[in-house]
Amino acid sequence: MLYYSKGAKDMVFTTGELQDALTGIFEKLGKRSKVLALPPDFTRFHSFAGAITEMAWRYYGNALTDVLPALGTHAPMTGSEIGRMFGNVPSGLFRVHDWRNDVVTVGTIPSELVHRLSEGKVDYSWPAQVNSLVMHGGHDLILSIGQVVPHEVIGMANYNKNIFVGTGGAEGINKSHFVGAVYGMERIMGRAESPVRSLLNYASEHFTRHLPIVYIQTVVGKDDAGKLQIRGLYAGDDFECFRLAAELSLQVNFLMVEKPVRKAVVWLDPEEFKSTWLGNKSVYRTRMALADGAELIVLAPGLKEFGEDKEIDRLIRKYGYAGTPATLEAVRKNADLSQNLSAAAHLIHGSSEGRFTVTYCPGHLTRREIESVHFNYAPLEEMLQRYNPQTLTDGFHTLPDGEEICYISNPALGLWAHKSRFEQHLP
C-alpha cells in the first residue's frame, strides 16, 4: 500500500511540510505501541533520515522504543555522530547492529534462482539475514527510513536493501555484493531493477512479508545555491513507493555530462569519508563519465583506512584494487577472500580496470599505503592549493593555465555518465 507520494525535480519540502507529511503518514498507520526505527548511519547524513527519525520520535513518544541504524558493514556511530544526525532523540534508544553475530537467517533462496538471476555467473544459495531485533523484537511497526539514490551494488539504494543489507549478516551481505560485482556495476547503477534487487524482493515476498515494515523514502538534490533539498517523499509497505522514488531520483541525481571527462576532481567530506570503502564512491559514481585514459583525483582529507571493518581493511591491503580478473583469481585461490565476498566485490568496484587512473590525496595514509593497493598518490596540501574546494563549484572548469577539470563536491549524491558509455549498458 502506498501511504504518501509527492515529488518533482524542482520541488522543495520545507521543514513544516515534511512534518505535516509525516504526521499524515503516521495517522494513516494508526495507533502503535512498540515502534522500531531503521534509519541509515552517518554515511547517509545528507538523506534527511535523521530529521525524519526525530520527527517520528516526537510523534510516537515512548512508543518508539528502539532506533537501529542500518550499518551494514560500516563502523558503529559515535555519540557525536548520533547527536549531530538525530538531534534530540535520546541516546538510550540507539542499538548497534552487529553484522557478524547478531543476525538471524529468515530464509534461503535456492542456488538455481541465484544462478539464473546472475546470468550464470555465480552458483550458490543466498541466505536472507536480518538483525535479531527486526525479526524478534515484538514491534508492531518498523519504520525503514532512507534515501533513494543511484548505487553501485544494487542499482538504486534503499527500500529492502535497508533491511537485508543494512541490518543483514556477513554471509548475506558478502554473497549479494558479489552477485552485483560479477554481473557488472555499470549494468546496474541507476536502475531500480537488478539481480541483487530481485534477490531482495524475493526475500521480502517469501520471508518477511509478515513483518510490519513501512518504508519512508526521500529523494534529495541540490538547489542552484548548492543547498540540499528534499525533492520527493514516498511512504509505503511495498515496491511501489520505491519505484516512484527511483524514477524521481533518476531525474534529480543522474547527471549526463556533455562530453567524456578527461580529468575529474572529487572532494570527500572528512566527516563522512574516512575509508576507501566509502570514498570509492568517487570511483563508482564517476566511472561512466570518464574518458579512456582519464585521471580521477580524489581529495580525501579524512582518509585514514581502507576498510572500516578490520578484516576487510586487511584484505584490501593484501589484494588491492587490481581489477576483475585478478580479483576473481584471488577468490578462487584464497580462502580468506572467498569467505569475504563483499570485500572481493568492493575490490572489483574500486578498480578502474586499467581504463583510467585513480589518484588519491589522503589526509592520513602514506604514499606507500596508497600505492600498495594500486592507486596513484599525490600530496593533499599540494593538490588542495591547485584544486580548492572552497572556490570550485560542481561542473566543468578551465583553470588559469588552461587545464580543464570536472569538479564534484559529493560523489554520494549522484551518478555521472556520458551517453556513449551509458548506452553500452542499456538493457
Image (spheres, grey):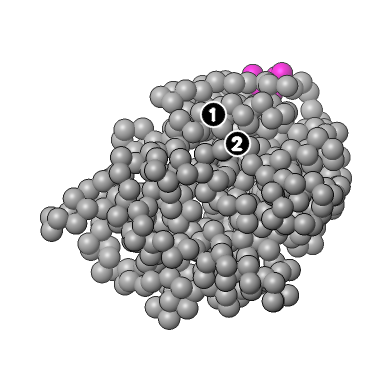
* Quadrant in the picture for residue 318: bottom right
Reading the image, the residue beneath label 1 is 247
Q: Going from the N terminus, do you reach mark 2 or mark 1 first?
A: 2
Q: Secondary structure at mark 2?
A: loop
Q: Amino acid at mark 1?
A: Glu
In the image shown, does 393 or 254 lie closer to the viewer?
254
Q: Amino acid at mark 2?
A: Ala
Counting other residues with Cα less than 10 Å from the Cα at mark 1, is it few (<14), some (14-19), or many (20 or more)? some
Reading the image, the residue beneath label 2 is 192
Q: Is residue 54 magenta?
A: no
Tag 2 near tag 1, CB within 8 Å: yes
Q: Secondary structure at mark 1?
A: helix
Q: Name the mark on residue 84.
A: none
Vertical arrangement, residue 6 with respect to residue 344, above or below: above
In the image shown, does 409 or 115 lie closer to the viewer?
115
Residues shaded magenta? 23-28
Residue at the image point whose x is 36% and y is 57% from the top:
292
Counting other residues with Cα less than 10 Å from the Cα at mark 2, is it few (<14), some (14-19), or many (20 or more)? many
Residue 8 coordinates in the image, percent (x, y): 47, 23
Q: Quadrant of the C terminus?
A: top right
Vertical arrangement, residue 303 with respect to residue 367, above or below: above
Residue at the image point whose x is 63% and y is 67% from the top:
328
| In-image side of 403 versus 174 (left or right) | left
Residue 38 coordinates in the image, percent (x, y): 68, 42
Q: Is residue 135 visible?
A: yes
Q: Is residue 228 visible?
A: no
